[in-house]
Image (cartoon, coloured by chain):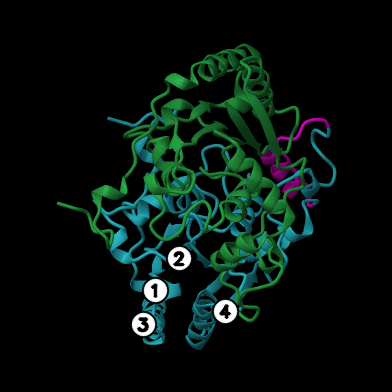
Chain colours: A green, B cyan
């Protein structure tokens, strides 16, 4: 299996970074090929802007998705986007590894999503959800957070974590056609003992070793909707 | 009323920017004070990193929220954060004005959230939801998107838009104590006629003129939970 790990923690000694390191070792130990995009180390630019394009389709008015589509076709999209897109298309499994900021990805990772999941390749027209441009590949979200597990779930103060992650799991990863595996979550990380951290590392390793048995989450399929995307009866 | 509009579209001629312009005019016309943070015009840095702090509490290991708390207290947090935080604390109403990217805010705006909603001021300890640091202020989300209205809602292909916006509306704006007004949404913007755009502008103006009659969305209150944040029976 070819694996791309996109990592987005600013502290190389963090537990989040330890999860990334463990994934690299474990997956390589299983004979998988692993590539990484450590966004802070890359000094990744998260801002989608006109600077991402060479020759513009419309130099007077920026429609970002349109210029992405044309820029990729013409091969003159920004080189940092092109490099990441190639890694993404190479991979069979995408792992997003990050600390939860505001119940969501850090901006540096949001900017990887905004810029790299280009229109015309990853999605476009009726190519989304099960028909998305990355169909056949898998995605795993691995995250650390400060909250405790009992603060999430039905009736809990923040509700189910999967509901908070909906724009990422459904609106992004499933949207581009990826089979989205259940997230791996390390709870309450800044406050727990070293032993508790070791337990999470052991759990994560077991999870990584059993990835091929994971059942992806269920999301909409286009055959449940008509041509105008109204639900079929 | 004092209003801060945080705007995050890369194209000054966009319809999204026209909504921003209309809000400035309309609110000023009503006698309100309006300030703006046009993030692309500011060349806003969205990346939360060690560079945001002067004297570090722990120079060897970055815990971002901890350094925020201490940095704000000591008055040596990055000047761009300090400026935005002052505008935020000045405002009675925060308007986030943006195009929906991946069912979420663009990275440049996520980075405003990550960096400006500082721990120790906007939240911290038991100061969140109705007890959040910005309690007493209001927030309005104004967004443009490509999708059609019938693609959202119960049973629709993307589900309810409010569910996709949960990490923003509940996990961010309500979390810091803001009264979150129902979002203003302009659907299918890249594909509609100029007349349809004028209709959205008229609707938005009416909405802005009636803001004081808006009923905020309902979110959890801390008095529904015990000291350890388990739900009370």
Chain label for disc 4:
B
Q: Mark 1 points at which residue?
A: B211
Locate residue A224, reporting x and y percent.
24, 48
Q: What residue is at 63 percent from the left and 49 percent from the top?
A: A112
Q: Distance between the residues labelled 1 and 4?
A: 15 Å
Q: Mark 2 points at which residue?
A: B140
Secondary structure at badge 2 equals strand
Q: Main secondary structure of the magenta part?
A: helix
Chain part drawn in magenta: B60-75
Q: Pinpoint the chain carrying mark 1.
A: B
**Which corner quadrant of the image does residue A213 belong to?**
top left
Q: Is residue A195 on the magenta stretch?
A: no
Q: Decide if residue A69 is on the left or right side of residue B206.
A: right
Q: Distance between the residues labelled 3 and 2?
A: 22 Å
Residue designated by label 3: B196
Same chain, labels 4 and 2? yes
- Residue plotted at (69% across, 34% down): A36
Q: How far apart are marks 4 and 2 (CA)?
A: 16 Å
């Amino acid at each position: 299996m070819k694996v791309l790990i996109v990592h987005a923690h600013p502290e190389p000694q963090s537990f989040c970074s330890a999860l990334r390191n463990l994934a690299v070792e474990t997956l390589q130990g299983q004979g998988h090929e692993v590539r990484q995009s450590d966004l802070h180390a890359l000094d990744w630019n998260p801002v989608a802007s006109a600077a991402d394009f060479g020759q513009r389709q419309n130099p007077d008015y920026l429609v970002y998705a349109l210029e992405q589509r044309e820029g990729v076709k013409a091969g003159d999209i920004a080189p940092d986007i092109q490099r990441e897109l190639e890694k993404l298309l190479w991979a069979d499994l995408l792992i997003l590894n990050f600390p939860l900021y505001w119940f969501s990805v850090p901006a540096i990772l949001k900017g990887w999503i905004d810029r790299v999941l280009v229109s015309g390749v990853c999605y476009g027209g009726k190519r989304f959800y099960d028909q998305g441009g990355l169909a056949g590949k898998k995605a795993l979200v691995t995250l650390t957070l400060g909250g405790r597990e009992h603060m999430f779930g039905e009736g809990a103060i923040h509700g189910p974590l999967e509901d908070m992650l909906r724009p990422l799991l459904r609106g992004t990863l499933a949207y581009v056609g990826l089979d989205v595996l259940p997230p791996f979550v390390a709870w309450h990380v800044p406050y727990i003992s070293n032993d508790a951290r070791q337990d999470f590392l052991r759990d994560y390793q077991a999870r990584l070793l059993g990835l091929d048995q994971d059942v992806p989450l269920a999301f909409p399929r286009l055959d449940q909707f008509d041509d105008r995307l109204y639900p079929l009866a």
